[in-house]
Image (tube, grey):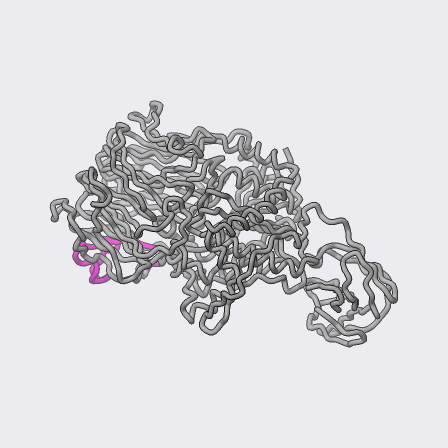
Amino acid sequence: MFRTSLVFVVIVAPLYRQPSIKSGALMKLQKSNVFLVASIVRWVGWGCDVEATRLLRVRRSSSTAFVRLITSGSIPYDRGLSNQPPRNISVTTNSIKMVPKPESSIFIDPSTYPLARKDESIVEDFHGTKVPDPYRWLEDPDSPETKAYVEKLNAISTPFIAASPVREKIREKLTKLWDYEKYGCTSKRGKYYFYYYNTGLQNQSVLYKQKDLNEKGEVFLDPNKLSDDGTTSIRTQCFTRDGTIMAYGLSEKGSDWMTLKFRTAEGVDLDDVVTGVKHSGLDWMPDNSGVFYSRYPEHKSAIEGSSTEKHKFHSLHFHRIGTPQKDDILVADFREDPEYMCSGTVSEDGRYLIVDVSRGCDPVNLLYYYDLTAAGNKITGKLDLKPLFDKFDAKYDFVDSEGDTALILTNHESPMFKLIRVKWTDAKEGPSRWETLIPEVEKSKLDWVTPVIGGRLIACYVEDVKNTLYVHCSKTGNRLYEIPLGIGSISGFFGKKHLSEIFIAFESFLTPTIIYYANFGDTKPTCVVEMKELRRVQIAGIDTSAINVKQVFFPSRDGTKIPMYIVHKNDLKLDGNNAALLNGYGGFNIADLPYFSVSRLLFLQYFGGVIACANLRGGSEYGEKWHEAGMRERKQNVFDDFIASAEYLIKNNYTSSKKLAIHGGSNGGLLVAACSQQRPELYGAVVNRVGVMDMLRFHKFTIGGAWLPEYGNPDVASDFPFIYKYSPLHNIRMPADGGQWPSTLLMTADHDDRVVPSHSLKYMARLYEVVREAKDVQRNPLIIRVEVRAGHGSGKPTSKIVRLCSLPCFLCNVFWYIFVNIAELVDMYSFLQRVLDLKWCE
């Protein structure tokens, strides 16, 4: 942008820059509220003498600003007006002396950023628009050239992050805070209770069993003993109905690919092994003869997680215990569309196999069923599935089987969901044959329903971005009473129709975990049974009573009210000088509910910061309409909501632009990338973890094709314009106001087989190319941290593992679980400490 002998104008003004003015010219500046001081100069370099024929002054007249020739003395540079580097300009009639202030300690010379090789021959035609893709070679994570470039990138980021003067304090405190006991939700399987437990800093949580809730549990399965580096994790598990055998899926290095193994309740391992399983639930035949699972065809490097091949033709299989995998039976596939995904569930009464078919992450599905009892519980080949709901017109979730009827949770003509009762043979005939059991509630989304003992249904709602639980009658659907919980989210639930006990895991911003339980015994459904605490986890050294949690609502650009949680210490001064970390997601029909985070407590306690969690359109906080308002061609609404969230924090003096950091992962990474491009002056820092950046090729890798219903398809002419308009990779340019990019940290993993690393690598390669050309403007650091031998997150060692974003669901939504380990968090907060100039307070 600035080179020797380039004629340009130095402007001191809010968010405005005029690229050039000829000597002696009179020019109108179309900016009604601008008062500028400008100079015609010939650029020689910062800190050098520059020549000027005259000094220009801009005078506002009515709604137009005029430039006229004058002479003057000194021009102060006000850093508050833009992101350009601070300096003073000494002016005489015939010359200007530009004297830079000393470089900031966070400055990285853009000329030192490693440039990636450009392959100019790769240009793709999208419906008449030529789009170059010079860094496509970075899509191969295993190529020597890609690995060498990753080393160069880490060579820039590692020393910068390590230079934080409080880095070791961050590591020490974060490790100490994270060193607390962690419990998962208890479940009852046969004669044992099972639960996950972590002593504090174990790489992976250990599965325990106990015969009595009051006795000490014993280790049932310890994944820490399955690998030397602590990266083997239990991804999923399922017990037989009598609790005698557990099938479980193991993941290596955070990969989504799983290997299934089997263990009896007494700890005996079976010889059966099933490999190549991905995006799969598990369920058993009622006679324990085998297990249903889902998979794709074989892929190279599947187990290692380095394959970027696109996934097609998800299918349902049956593995019979005691037989080799090559004899597994294909029971259902749907070849009419390669993007279809499927899963199998067996009803609690053991009679029906229910097959769920979805189109990627589209929030609509089909349901089929097969009568296992009528077939004598024999699986010999492809099943003759019967349609239950055979149109992609709504979401249909199977809840329970009651003889010849089924309970279904649906949003058909009910965007906040309702529970219906249908006959297996009549459901497909339409709403006229359905009975509404629990009607839709206007302002509360019915999230899930589970049948439990004594004719009860436990219904979980999302009400203004928090979970609430109610007990309903399974016969009439009537609401009987509420189970009080407080502001937070349900992180686990267990209950069965044949068991008298239920267990609930609850968490909130300030509460790590509370495990509640109740024993209904033989009480009537209308009898209110008190929930008791089985376990309560607390963090030593943190006074949660000194922390305030509030929820605010504010208008987005189009007037839509957006909710946001704000967490800070009680004694916070609203003077705009506080650091703030704004988190967002906004997509895939997922409600981002309150959850506990150790790293947030560190930010609050030791940096005196503010945590803000914005609930954006695109999620499911207010049902399907809320989701639809933030998908496809309406994706800009999500960015507008997030920008409005930042503006609210600044306007209400929680923070200022220079102290505001934004953070997002996966789809949230797309969010913060787009917002940092659209409003770069609004943020002091951006932390982007495994972001979806290349919106023209996201669907060509691994599970990316499942995201087409959410984002749209760039290969479709009508979709391309709105995708290309915000695609982060294709909108990298210096800010139009002449400012610079906010300090930015990208984080990815070389084995991420969900959001493949090329998203971040190509983005950074292009960003470095752009800022090299504007090296005299860009002073904020732009770095990327690439973790080696790690995937999207689940299964990372504690060195360890911390949940950064809680977004659970099945199949499409499960891949938005965001996990980080302590080392990543230390790097993240070390980066923020440096670029936001955070002060450590004990």
Q: Is residue 822 left or right of residue 305?
A: right
Residue 215 seen in render? yes
Magenta span: 414-436
- x, y (%) of residue 7? 75, 69
Q: Quadrant of residue 502?
A: top left
- Identified at 82% across, 60% down, the residue is 49
Using the image, determine if residue 364 lies above or below residue 793: below
Residue 439 seen in render? no
- Identified at 25% across, 31% down, the residue is 264
Toward the viewer: 543 or 674? Answer: 674
- x, y (%) of residue 729? 52, 60
Toward the viewer: 594 or 149? Answer: 149
- x, y (%) of residue 507? 44, 39
Q: Quadrant of residue 218?
A: top left
- x, y (%) of residue 354? 23, 50
- Identified at 24% across, 45% down, the residue is 292
Using the image, determine if residue 45 lies above or below residue 65: above
Q: Quadrant of the C terminus?
A: top right
Q: Is residue 469 magenta?
A: no
- Identified at 38% across, 54% down, the residue is 309
Toward the viewer: 256 or 350? Answer: 256
Q: Quadrant of the N terminus?
A: bottom right
Q: Is residue 704 left or right of residue 95?
A: left
Q: Residue furthest top?
A: 215
Using the image, determine if residue 674 lies above or below residue 809: below
Q: Is residue 801 left or right of residue 740?
A: left
Q: Is residue 38 left or right of residue 408?
A: right
